[in-house]
Amino acid sequence: MSTTGTVTSASDLQMNFMTLLVTQLQNQNPLEPMDNQDMAAQLAQFSQLQQLESMNNSFSQVLTSLQQGYASSLIGKDVSFATTADDGTQETQTGEVEEVVLDDGAIELIVGDHQVSLADVLSVRE
């Protein structure tokens, strides 16, 4: 099983459940066997969890592709973004997007001397 604080995939949970189930079946009391309906319901829940996890991964991949496409469409356009000035105050700057960089899953825009996260873009102009 996983340690506290770590995320375990549905397939890992299902394998752990199956191991536990086999152990329970091997050691069950023959006069009071386990209920088949309960086992089937638990297996169905694990199957649903696995399908939801797969769907979530697919949606995540689609979102990443859409964000990359959107970022690419910003090349040559003026964007406004928030930056921190030398004195620590927030200011808004504007510049033309020159390049899109995919940095370890994060999408960064090169605007002049700044590397701006796509999430930090405040406005876009033609």
Image (cartoon, grey):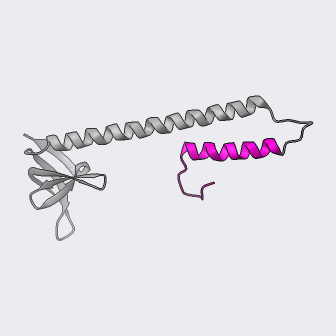
Identify the residue shown where x is 24% and y is 43%.
68
The front one of 103 and 108 is 103
> Which residue occupies the extreme top position in the image?
37
Would you say the magenta stretch is mainly helix, strand or loop?
helix
Name above or below for residue 86 compared with residue 78: below
Identify the residue shown where x is 20% and y is 49%.
121
Q: Position of residue 99 (x, y in %)?
A: 13, 51
Q: Please provide the residue range marked out in magenta.
A: 1-26
State the image quarter where residue 75 is shown: top left
State the image quarter where residue 36 is shown: top right
The front one of 26 and 120 is 26
Left/right of residue 38 with respect to residue 105 in the rendered view:
right
**Is 37 covered by the magenta stretch?**
no
Left/right of residue 64 with respect to residue 75 in the rendered view:
right
Left/right of residue 8 with respect to residue 38 in the rendered view:
left
Identify the residue shown where x is 19% and y is 55%.
116
For the N terminus, which image quadrant? bottom right
Left/right of residue 77 with respect to residue 107 in the rendered view:
left
Identify the residue shown where x is 9% and y is 44%.
77
The front one of 74 and 126 is 74
